[in-house]
Image: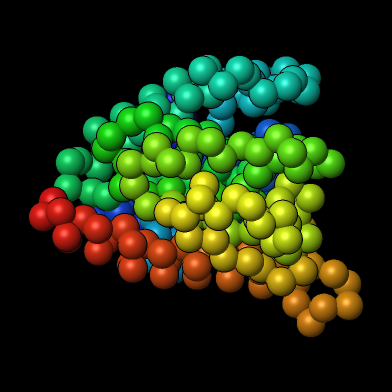
């Protein structure tokens, strides 16, 4: 599968993040481009890929709904295996993504070994307007640490909606971007910008990797 790699990936990294796109935008969308570059600037080499339905859209220009979950996870796992072959057994692998991509990353990390961390950028806790149908049941099965970076105005999950879900989120580090929506776009009156919030999200990822992912690997003696 074709991968979009940052420069650090080519230099024998000791850690790499595999980034999956959201449901409606491709791997090279402006959001994903900025996020990938900011992660690289924070010392997190990364690669991006596209799920099969998005690859088909790129080929013929026709919009399609996402593939079913088993197909998405199969595709994601194939990328993890491909990256593992390229970077070797000593490199830490973190999976993550935007919205749906982050959710698939967390599902993958709840089912497979060999993943060292998960980062969701704008996690879809529930569909907009349906806060009673949460998508966190698998969190208790995660086999590695997880970080979620979420805008406080995200219709897929706001701070006040976390009440009552403490047990599901107990093992997840949750960081909020003030005023950000699902694409980390702040309010016009804020003294901030989407670029600033994406950069802050990348910084949170670096802190998480240093404090949770690397430290867990050291503690287990791997």
Task: Determine whether 89 is above or below 1 in the image.
Answer: below
Q: Residue at coordinates 60% horizontally, 50% vertically from top-left? A: 165
Measured as percent of width and height from the top left, residue 138 is found at 48, 35
Horizontal arrangement in the rendering, residue 19 relative to residue 32 (left or right): left
- Number of marks drawn: 0
How is the rendered protein coloured? Answer: rainbow
216 lies above or below 26 = below
Q: Is residue 36 left or right of residue 218?
A: right
Quarter assignment of residue 187 = bottom right
Question: Which residue is pictured at 66% across the width and 72% down the height?
Answer: 196
In the picture, measured across the screen, residue 117 lies left or right of residue 128, that is left
In the displayed structure image, the side of residue 67 where residue 210 appears, left or right: left
Q: Nearer the viewer, residue 110 or 83?
A: 110
80 w.r.t. 65: above or below? below
Q: Residue at x 61, y 23 (%)?
A: 55
**Residue 81 at what x, y percent from top left?**
31, 29
Whether residue 13 is situated above or below residue 86 in the rendered picture: below
Name which residue lies at 17% across and 60% down: 218
Is the N terminus in the top left, top right, bottom left or bottom right quadrant?
top left
Which image quadrant is residue 149 in? bottom right
Image coords of residue 219 (percent x, y): 17, 60
* x and y percentages locating residue 9 in the rendered image: 35, 51
Comparing 14 with 150, the one in front is 150
- Is residue 56 shown to the viewer in this render? yes
Q: Quadrant of residue 112?
A: top left
In the image as oriented, which residue stretches furthest toward the right? 189
Q: Is residue 41 visible?
A: no
């Amino acid at each position: 599968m074709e991968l979009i790699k940052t420069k650090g990936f080519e230099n024998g990294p000791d850690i790499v993040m595999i980034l999956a796109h959201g449901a409606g935008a491709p791997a090279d969308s402006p959001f994903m481009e900025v996020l990938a570059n900011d992660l690289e600037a924070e010392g997190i080499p990364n690669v991006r890929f596209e799920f099969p339905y998005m690859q088909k859209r790129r080929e013929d220009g026709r919009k399609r709904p996402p593939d079913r979950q088993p197909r998405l996870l199969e595709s994601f796992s194939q990328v993890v295996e491909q990256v593992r072959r390229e970077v070797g057994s000593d490199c830490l692998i973190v999976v993550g993504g935007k919205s749906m991509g982050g959710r698939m990353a967390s599902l993958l990390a709840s089912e497979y070994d060999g993943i060292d961390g998960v980062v969701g950028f704008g996690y879809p806790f529930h569909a907009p307007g349906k806060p009673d149908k949460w998508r966190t049941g698998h969190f208790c099965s995660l086999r590695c640490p997880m970080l979620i970076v979420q805008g406080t105005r995200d219709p897929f999950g706001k701070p006040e909606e976390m009440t009552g879900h403490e047990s599901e989120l107990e093992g997840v580090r949750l960081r909020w971007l003030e005023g950000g929506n699902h694409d980390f776009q702040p309010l016009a009156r804020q003294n901030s910008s989407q670029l600033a919030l994406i950069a802050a999200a990348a910084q949170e990822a670096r802190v998480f990797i240093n404090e949770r992912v690397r430290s867990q690997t050291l503690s287990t003696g791997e």
